[in-house]
């Protein structure tokens, strides 16, 4: 699955299938496009649990981290 990564302020990153990132939480400020990667269930990508990322994307449309710590649930009710 093609995942687009966006960076906000500090070490906040958003992951989504939406190429524009328009579904990322506005509460975290402006997200800037960082890069795209392929993620597949059951694999590890640079030490992260890909399944956790994909579960959040399936459930909420995005996965958000701050300094590599999952914060998706804090913002899941605030989608655009």
Image (tube, helix red, strand yellow):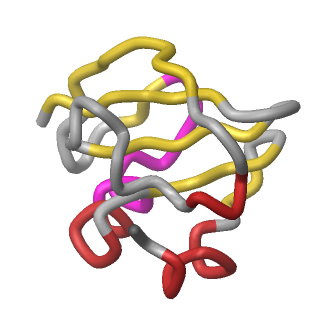
Q: Is the residue 35 above or below the residue 77 in the image?
A: above
Residue situated in front as seen by the camera: 56 or 34: 34
Residue situated in front as seen by the camera: 63 or 52: 63
The C terminus - image quarter:
bottom left
72 part of magenta stretch = no
Rendering coords of residue 13 (x, y %): 62, 37
Q: Is the residue 59 above or below the residue 61 in the image?
A: below
Residue 61: name its quadrant.
bottom left
Rendering coords of residue 71 (x, y %): 69, 66
At a point 58% along the width and 54% down the height, the residue shown is: 64
Residue 18: name its quadrant.
top left
At a point 62% along the width and 28% down the height, the residue shown is: 7
Residues shaded magenta? 46-54
Q: Is the residue 43 above or below the residue 37 in the image?
A: below
Residue 16: name its quadrant.
top left
Residue situated in front as seen by the camera: 57 or 78: 78
Rendering coords of residue 66 (x, y %): 78, 48
53 part of magenta stretch = yes
Q: How many numbered markers are drawn?
A: 0
Q: Is the residue 26 above or below the residue 74 in the image?
A: above
The N terminus - image quarter:
top left
Rendering coords of residue 29 (x, y %): 71, 46
Asked whether, in this view, residue 79 is left or right of residue 17, the answer is right
Residue reaching furthest top? 35
């Amino acid at each position: 699955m093609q995942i687009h990564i966006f960076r906000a302020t500090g070490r906040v990153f958003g992951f989504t299938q939406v190429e524009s990132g328009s579904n990322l939480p506005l509460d975290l400020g402006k997200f800037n496009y960082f890069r795209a990667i392929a993620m597949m269930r059951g694999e590890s990508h640079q030490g992260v649990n890909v399944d956790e990322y994909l579960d959040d994307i399936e459930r909420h449309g995005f996965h958000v981290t701050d300094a590599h710590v999952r914060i998706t649930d804090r913002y899941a009710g605030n989608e655009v």
